[in-house]
Amino acid sequence: MTANKRIVLSSDHAAIDMRRAIADHITAKGWEAVDIGPQTPESTHYPAHGEAAARRVTSGDCALGIILCGTGQGIMMAANKVKGIRCGVCSDVFSAQMIREHNDANMLSMGARVVDTPLALEIVDAFLDAEFEGGRHGTRVDMIKALEA
Ligand code: RB5
């Protein structure tokens, strides 16, 4: 894994408590949590938060990103519009491992109305503990990158 230990965290209003739990969890694992909010519970717009987190990753400021909304779907769609982002929604541990090992995902999305916080923390662990395998998977990820050209 990269020497950059910074992980950007963002969400909409539906996932503030889960986001804070994840921040504490990854900090305890030795990562630096870069929590870009929002910090207050007013209804807000997930595309803006997905984009803001994605740009922290593509700029190189953060190595990885974890984003949350009610389902994890809308904020993932927004993040994936930023060139260079590969973000998957996960509600199970296996998928979280696979999006790193096979898809070289640089962002993880989850739904706070889909998974509870204990499961979300397990999913985060699987995502962070996995490594991209390269090889034939690198060929396929390069094909994804080509779609952005
Ligand atoms: C907000 O109510 C909700 O639409 C949002 O959190 C998310 O689930 C969208 O994909």
Image (cartoon, rainbow, N blue to C red):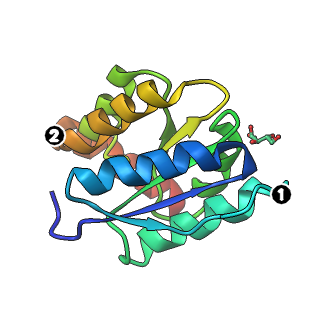
Residue 37 percent coordinates (x, y): 61, 65
Q: Alpha-carbon neighbours of circle 2 within 10 Å: few (<14), some, or many (≥20)?
A: some
Q: Please give the name of the residue rendered at 70% of the width and 36% of the height, measured from the top-left corner.
A: 70
Residue 126 percent coordinates (x, y): 28, 33
Q: Please give the name of the residue rendered at 38% of the width and 52% of the height, measured from the top-left corner.
A: 24
Residue 114 percent coordinates (x, y): 62, 24
Q: Is residue 43 left or right of residue 133?
A: right
* Residue that numbered label 2 is attached to: 133
The amino acid pointed to by label 2 is Glu
The amino acid pointed to by label 1 is Glu
Task: Mark 2 and ligand 1: say if the CB distance to the nearest ligand atom is below 8 Å.
Answer: no
Say if 93 sits above or below 147 in the image: above
Between 12 and 72, which is closer to the camera in this rendering?
A: 12
Cα–Cα gap, marks 2 and 1: 41 Å
Say whether residue 136 is visible: yes
Q: Is residue 4 left or right of residue 40?
A: left
Say if 31 sits above or below 56 in the image: above
* Residue that numbered label 1 is attached to: 42
Between 60 and 19, which is closer to the camera in this rendering?
A: 19
Q: Quadrant of ligand 1?
A: top right
- Asked which secondary structure carries label 2, the reply is loop
Q: Please give the name of the residue rendered at 55% of the width and 24% of the height, measured from the top-left corner.
A: 115
Between 101 and 36, which is closer to the camera in this rendering?
A: 36
Say whether residue 107 is visible: no
